[in-house]
Image (spheres, coloured by chain):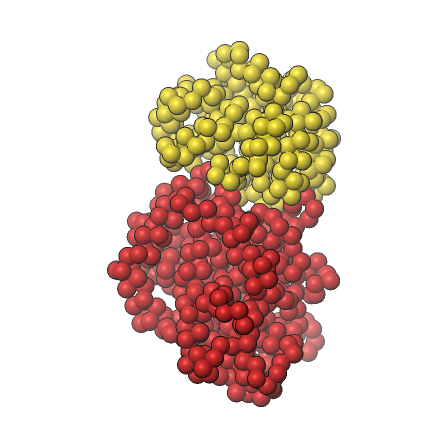
Chain colours: A yellow, B red
């Protein structure tokens, strides 16, 4: 199946969606693959994967620690692509990458997207690449049929939103709470207004992420109008809590995924 | 953004979406302040009467006799706060006030930028929070005490290499969480646009003064200028006024650590490759996949695996040259300047002094060394290092 088709097919069903996040290779490649399978069994509609980076300024302590674990276990970009190929063999769910620009730049932007497409990646979000700097990445994404994903927040101005909407494909990643990634008790107060503003301007699906750690928060962002919820730190936190016991880890992550997915239905 | 913030292919603003609006706001405030006579008058008044500008250009007679040519020192060590950093923090502090921000945050390596931010916070009545690598908190204790005396909070950073790189990561994270009321006083001419431009413009007074001073004293320009380069703010501040003077060699001196043949150095321009760190494209120390290496230097202020984007461009265009000085050579220069001129340089600045010793010089040469800071903060660290080496 072609990359963009996987997203389109999923979006053609009008379900609310859940996308969990893992750092590839955390705590090691083998366990990471078992965790991905757990997420698929747990009902993940899409899978979002991070390639670990030594210096992740948009991430809180939980994902920083996951990056460190993965790097210490020998993770690198080529191994990440091999891993994604294995995940793709097991699922037709869309796969998104979330990573930092230096990894893409150093690999060669065009080569990175070509390789990503080859292993079955559907969407790429580069956390520190605002639309103004994204020209070569956008060209590469287009060429490979990969959806370029952009983050929007309540602070994004109208001008810049227009610029972003011109280039964004797949879905929009809406920051549910200003800050870095991490588990939070509350979502931002004016999320509703932001979603309204986006819906007026764009047909793209809106996924809310950053700080979502409980099923109740998933229900809340979906009630406010988001089409999907993304959860990273709360999943990675369950990896951290179960280090040293891979089967307990997979079980905990799968159970949590199931709980979060259920919140998109009820 | 109104400008792309590029130096050749380098620079730009590679930051998470949440930070783009605040950087736009900062750019607008900066461009307006440039043209605002009231802002410029207040800046100029504080630089003169609070910080002590102009700083002297000192003819170092003893050094000159030893090296066999004329050596001048630009005495940024005499600036209030003890280093050139105050030029920038006064400017950015005034920008913060102009933008209505209530709180200043900053990273610091050696602690000089932290001190300079803390004193400006006290001066302007703003809360200050400083992020400092835990390793640097240990080796730069006097500066921690000074920051706290000025009323700033110092938060040790335990992640990664526990030094400047990680302090910047942590400050960026904090800023992302508190972007509405907080101003990030960036310490060096690196980071995302508009910081490399802002820091250069507030630091260029070093070179502007030095150029006028040397012309007055010698009736001609120096043959070479030496400045240490970590992120590169004192160097760019010194170089900018001389960029169009083709006969003047501009030499940036990077931290060679235990030697460029080892992995333990911070010589980003000499040994690094092009990459993206802390919001701009420049040279970085990294592996083949783009994972950032830890830097090493005896001097906390130079212990950084990145460098300002304008230096990357000056290197590529060959307008400036970049060399490296080892920890040991810097230590020697630290003592050499103390003994020969009665001046204790910061370990950072000692790298620039050490470079002078290694150059082939002719009697008609005039060297201008940017003495970017004073070394009182380094005394116990240097004593420990010398003890370890059994000297």
Quadrant location of the C terminus of chain B?
bottom right
Residue found at x 64% / y 32%? A113
Figure label count:
0
In the depicted structure, whether residue B36 falls above or below residue B277: below
Drawn side of residue A141 relative to residue B83, left or right = right
Quadrant location of the N terminus of chain B?
top left
Residue found at x 55% / y 74%? B224
Residue found at x 68% / y 60%? B264
Give the percent coordinates (x, y) of residue B233: 49, 62
Residue found at x 54% / y 84%? B70
Residue A238 visible in the snapshot: no
Drawn side of residue B130 relative to residue B358, left or right = left
Along the viewing direction, whichever of B37 and A59 lies nearer the viewer: B37
Q: Quadrant of residue A74?
A: top right
In the depicted structure, whether residue A108 falls above or below residue B345: above
Along the viewing direction, whichever of B331 and A142 lies nearer the viewer: A142
Residue positioned most to the top: A13
Along the viewing direction, whichever of B69 and B358 lies nearer the viewer: B69
Give the percent coordinates (x, y) of residue A32: 68, 30
Give the percent coordinates (x, y) of residue A189: 36, 30
Residue positioned most to the left: B38
Residue B124 visible in the snapshot: yes
Give the percent coordinates (x, y) of residue B180: 36, 42
In the depicted structure, whether residue A53 falls above or below residue B388: above
In the depicted structure, whether residue A250 falls above or below residue B24: above
């Amino acid at each position: 199946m072609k990359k963009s088709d996987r997203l389109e097919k999923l979006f053609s069903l009008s379900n609310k969606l859940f996308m969990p996040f893992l750092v590839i290779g955390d705590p090691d490649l083998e366990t990471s693959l078992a965790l991905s399978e757990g997420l698929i069994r747990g009902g993940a509609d899409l899978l979002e994967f991070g390639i670990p980076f030594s210096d992740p300024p948009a991430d809180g302590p939980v994902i920083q620690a996951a990056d460190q674990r993965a790097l210490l276990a020998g993770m690198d970009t080529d191994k990440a692509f091999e891993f994604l190929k294995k995940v793709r063999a097991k699922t037709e769910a869309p796969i998104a990458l979330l990573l930092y620009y230096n990894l893409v730049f150093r690999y060669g932007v065009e080569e990175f997207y070509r390789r990503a497409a080859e292993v079955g990646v559907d969407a790429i979000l580069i956390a520190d690449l605002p639309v103004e700097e994204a020209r070569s990445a956008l060209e590469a994404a287009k060429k490979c049929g990969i959806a370029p994903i952009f983050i929007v927040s309540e602070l994004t101005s109208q001008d810049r939103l227009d610029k972003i909407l011109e280039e964004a494909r797949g879905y929009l990643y809406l920051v549910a709470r200003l800050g870095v990634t991490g588990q939070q008790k509350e979502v931002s107060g004016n999320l509703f207004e932001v979603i309204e503003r986006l819906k007026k301007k764009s047909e793209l699906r809106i996924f809310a992420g950053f700080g979502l750690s409980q099923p109740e928060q998933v229900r809340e962002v979906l009630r406010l109008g988001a089409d999907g919820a993304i959860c990273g730190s709360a999943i990675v936190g369950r990896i951290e809590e179960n280090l040293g016991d891979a089967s307990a880890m997979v079980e905990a992550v799968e159970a949590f995924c199931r709980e979060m997915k259920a919140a998109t239905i009820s | 953004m109104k400008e792309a913030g590029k130096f050749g292919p380098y620079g730009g603003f590679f930051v998470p979406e949440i930070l783009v609006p605040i950087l736009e706001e900062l750019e607008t405030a900066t461009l307006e302040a440039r043209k605002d006579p009231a802002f410029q008058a207040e800046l100029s008044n504080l630089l003169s009467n609070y910080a002590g500008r102009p700083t002297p250009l000192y003819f170092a007679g003893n050094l000159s006799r030893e090296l066999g040519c004329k050596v001048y020192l630009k005495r940024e060590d005499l600036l209030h706060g003890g280093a050139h950093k105050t030029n920038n923090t006064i400017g950015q502090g005034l920008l913060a006030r102009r933008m209505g921000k209530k709180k200043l945050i900053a990273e610091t390596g050696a602690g000089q930028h932290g001190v300079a931010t803390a004193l400006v916070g006290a001066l302007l009545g703003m809360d200050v929070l400083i992020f400092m690598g835990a390793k640097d908190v240990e080796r730069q204790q006097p500066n921690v005490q000074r920051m706290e005396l000025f009323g700033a909070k110092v938060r040790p950073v335990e992640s990664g290499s526990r030094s400047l790189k990680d302090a910047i990561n942590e400050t960026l994270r904090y800023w992302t969480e508190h972007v509405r009321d907080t101003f990030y006083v960036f310490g060096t001419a690196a980071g995302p646009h508009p910081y490399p431009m802002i820091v250069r413009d507030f630091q260029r007074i070093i070179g502007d003064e030095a150029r006028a001073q040397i012309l007055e004293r010698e009736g001609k320009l120096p043959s070479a200028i030496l400045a240490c380069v970590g992120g590169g703010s004192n160097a760019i501040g010194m170089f900018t006024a001389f960029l169009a003077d083709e006969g003047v060699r501009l030499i940036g001196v990077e931290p060679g650590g235990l030697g460029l043949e080892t992995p333990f150095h911070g010589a980003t321009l000499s040994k690094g490759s092009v990459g993206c760190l802390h919001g701009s494209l420049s040279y970085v120390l990294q592996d083949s996949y783009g994972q950032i290496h830890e830097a090493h230097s005896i001097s906390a202020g130079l212990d950084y695996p990145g460098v300002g984007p304008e230096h990357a461009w000056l290197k590529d265009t060959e307008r400036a040259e970049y060399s490296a000085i080892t920890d040991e050579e810097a230590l020697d220069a630290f003592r050499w300047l103390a003994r020969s001129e009665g001046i204790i340089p910061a370990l950072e600045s000692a790298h620039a002094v050490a470079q002078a010793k290694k150059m082939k010089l002719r009697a008609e040469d005039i060297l201008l060394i940017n003495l970017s800071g004073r070394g009182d903060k380094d005394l116990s660290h240097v004593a420990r290092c010398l003890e370890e080496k059994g000297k």
